Image (spheres, coloured by chain):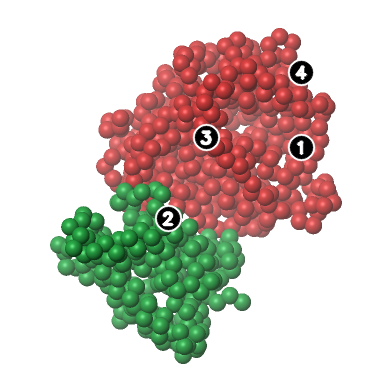
Chain colours: A red, B green
Amino acid sequence: MKKQIANWGNYPRIESDEQTFSFTEELQTYVKKKEPFIARGYGRCYGDASLAPNTISTLRYNKVLSFDTEKGIFECQSGLTLDKILTIIVPKGWFLPVTPGTKFITIGGAVASDVHGKNHHVDGSFSAHVIDMDVIGTDGTLYTCSPTQHSDLFWATCGGMGLTGVISRIKFDLKKIETSYIKQKQLKAKNLEDILRLFEENSHYTYSVAWIDCLKKGKGFGRSILILGEHAKKEEIPAKYQGNPLKLPPQKQILFPFNLPSFVLNKLTVKAFNFLYYGKNLKREINNVVSYEPFFYPLDAIQLWNRGYGKKGFIQYQFVLPLESKAGLIEILHRISDKGIGSFLAVLKVFGRQDDLISFPREGYTLALDIPVRNGLFPFLDELDALVLKYGGRLYLSKDARMKPEILENSYPHLSAFKEIISKYNPQSAFSSLQSERLHITSGKSLI
Amino acid sequence: MNPSVLILGASSDIGMALAEKFAQNGYPLVLAARNSQRLAPLQSDLEIKYGTGCAILEFDITHTDTHQATWDSLREKPGITICVAGYMKDNEQVIKDTAETLKTIATNFTGPVAMLNIIAADYAKNGKGIIAGISSVAGLRGRQSNYIYGSAKAGLTAYLSGLRNRMYPHQVHVLTVLPGFMDTKMTAHLKLPKLLTAQPAAVADAIYRGIQKKKNIIYIKWFWKWIMFIIRHIPESIFKKKKL
């Protein structure tokens, strides 16, 4: 059915002929179609990665295939969302090995984006926990791949943005938990030096992430709140929770009712928000026990919060810089605060080691911030891209909607190896998205 | 303990949504469909999520000669039967092709009648049971754009009404479900107005409630009752000139 689709950033928005399927053989038939297409899950990547004039939605292909409650191994079809998986595994004492900041993504999307979470420095990205998976190739062939079987396909599929084929089945490891609660610690950092030092001092924590005020200048430049967490052990949770330590959090959601007019978000309102957000933590250190929901998914409580950025949409700009490029982080943050753009929630995190074929994470600092689309934004982001490149960093494809192909070319060291595997498994560019065309990864000529 | 539920045509979008709904509420299931091995993922899904038993059964509603044997093969007879089997292709193609016409009638009408006769007889003998048949608002008046499918569903609606009447003294309840537009594979080629179109999960919820409350006839989405009220009452002299 033809419909208007956009990803979470609401930019760009296009018309797409979206088909659905419930059974593997329906998918195997669909992939043989003549026009290029891309698989699409929940559409929670931000940019144009899962957009194309032809898309196949995996959302009805969402069955649980096996769940070993002893060993903590879960196997399902690619359209199942993390949100559903949590309701199945948490009551049995298991958790996702890696989760991004929203649970409304499909497991296929988690692999195609090779998502990372607050525990990247300890547990790596999602692909580190995949045991094996099935990928449907252009002629309908089902390839089972893993780090040892069709390993080229495996590594090109993890973080490969759906360009190797349609991921159909995924089997992955879970993380053992005693309770569904998180022992949380929040630390205030006065400035950038302070937050980077705190990250280092607290690297033994499983989960760590910082909210950073991108607009603050002068002495408080880079002021932040560092949020740390561990899965709480049974004896660490309050007595009132002891009876049901693996209780699922209540599913309460409020809806962001309409697109906020774009003038609402300006330097003043964001500054005011940041002032309040930073100021709400009165003490330098707060310790408490919270459910996993507000810890991992604070924004999921507001359905369609992306409407806050207005009808024109927004860009989530996320880059990573190597640890030795602290000067680069400072320079980029200065450029952002001088420009006076910045979002309610800018997020800073230190990644651990990773050197995969095409996955985004690598050891270093990653910063993500939401910026509403407006005149002059893209040239400014091009300037930031040049800085990211200069300091040896790169951008996250799942957030990207506007990077130039040469930036990708010069920032992902294994890009040519990735392209070679694409040309082996996807020679006619049958799997192709607006993003892969824009970045010259594929060449599906019939795309707009 | 809940009776088990037999779903005829379980690999349709509505069939799978019904399976989910009943499993969630603790009903064991028997899922009957052509290519039943396609239902293995659904089977594991429901067993893992809800811990309910779920059997799958190879079954073709149009192969009426196999119906008695299929029913006899069930050691424990399901106390609730829901017939979801349906088939709809573009009417223009169907009317030019006798095989397609007969397939439309067999899947929507004669097949369900043959199977439900067998099940109803058993239920009557035991003095209990619930049968739900998914018909369609398309059966309430023949329209040029969809009258082969519509007439088959009209037959099914009349059959269910008669069956309800006959089964009443035997404490067997019969529910007629009249959906309007639904967002399923069967309608994927049609451009349906979003407001009038029901999602499979909402259809399953409505059928589940209808069975719990022992309703006789339910429409999926309340306004269809009134839309069809108007369509049915347009005088034939005017109706025949309309492009509907």
**Mark 4 is on which residue type?**
Lys
- Give the residue number, with chain letter if any, for mark 2: B198
Residue A12 in picture, x, y percent from top left: 42, 29
Q: Position of residue A19 (x, y in %)?
A: 36, 47
Q: Quadrant of the C terminus of chain A?
A: top left
**Pointer 4 residue:** A190
Would you name the residue on which mark 3 appears? A258
- Which of discs 2 and 4 lies nearer the camera? The answer is 2
Q: Amino acid at mark 2?
A: Ala
Disc 4 versus disc 3: nearer the observer: 3
Q: CA distance from mark 4 to mark 1?
A: 20 Å
Q: What residue sits right under mark 1 in the picture?
A: A184
Residue occupying the far left of the picture: B96
Q: Secondary structure at mark 3?
A: loop
Answer above or below: position of A266 versus B39: above
Residue situated in front as seen by the camera: B59 or A410: B59
| Residue closest to the eye, A30 or B90 | B90
Q: Is residue A437 shown above or below B129?
A: above
